[in-house]
Image (cartoon, rainbow, N blue to C red):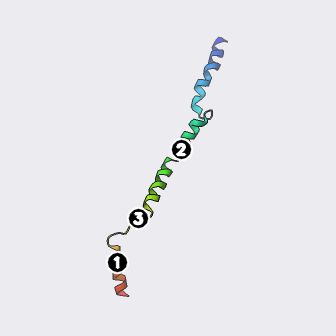
Amino acid sequence: VKYKKEHEKVKGHYMAGTLVDFPEVMRCGQQEKNKGLRIYQKDYHQTKTKIHLPSDIIANQVAKRCQD
């Protein structure tokens, strides 16, 4: 009986890994899940205004116009 009482007291420490009891830990977990998306969006917004043209695209466009 004494063992069971001690076990019931200590059981709360084992349940700490469930994350349901701790909203702060759950919030941090959600932030970690969204970290990749945040980094992707940040990089996208930094590079969306830059023009990315291959070096031969202009020559190809000029050649197409000349053929017309």
Q: Earlier in the sequence, mark 2 or mark 3?
A: 2
Location of residue 52 by image quarter: bottom left
Q: Could you say whether the residue bearing mark 2 is in a helix, strand or loop? A: helix
Badge 1 is on which residue?
A: 60
Crowding at mark 2 (Cα within 10 Å: few <14, some 14-19, many 20+) = few
- The mark found on residue 35 in the picture is none
Disc 2 marks a residue whose amino acid type is Gln
Q: Work out whether residue 33 or residue 31 is closer to the camera in this orientation and state it.
A: 31
Numbered circles on residues, count: 3
Sequence-wise, the earlier of marks 2 and 1 is: 2
Residue to which mark 3 is pinned = 50
Front position among marks 1 and 3 = 3
Give the numbered dot on residue 31.
2
- Residue at 61% x, 23% y is 11
Q: Amino acid at mark 3?
A: Lys
Residue 58 in percent (x, y) is at 34, 76
Q: Is residue 16 above or below residue 1?
A: below
Nearer the observer: mark 2 or 3; the answer is 3
- In three-dimensional space, the C-alpha distance between marks 2 and 1, rounded to whole angstroms, equals 46 Å
The N terminus lies in which quarter of the figure?
Answer: top right
The structure residue drawn at horizontal position 47% and vertical position 54%, both measured from the top left corner, is 42
SS type, badge 3 = loop
**Mark-to-mark CA distance, 1 and 3:** 21 Å
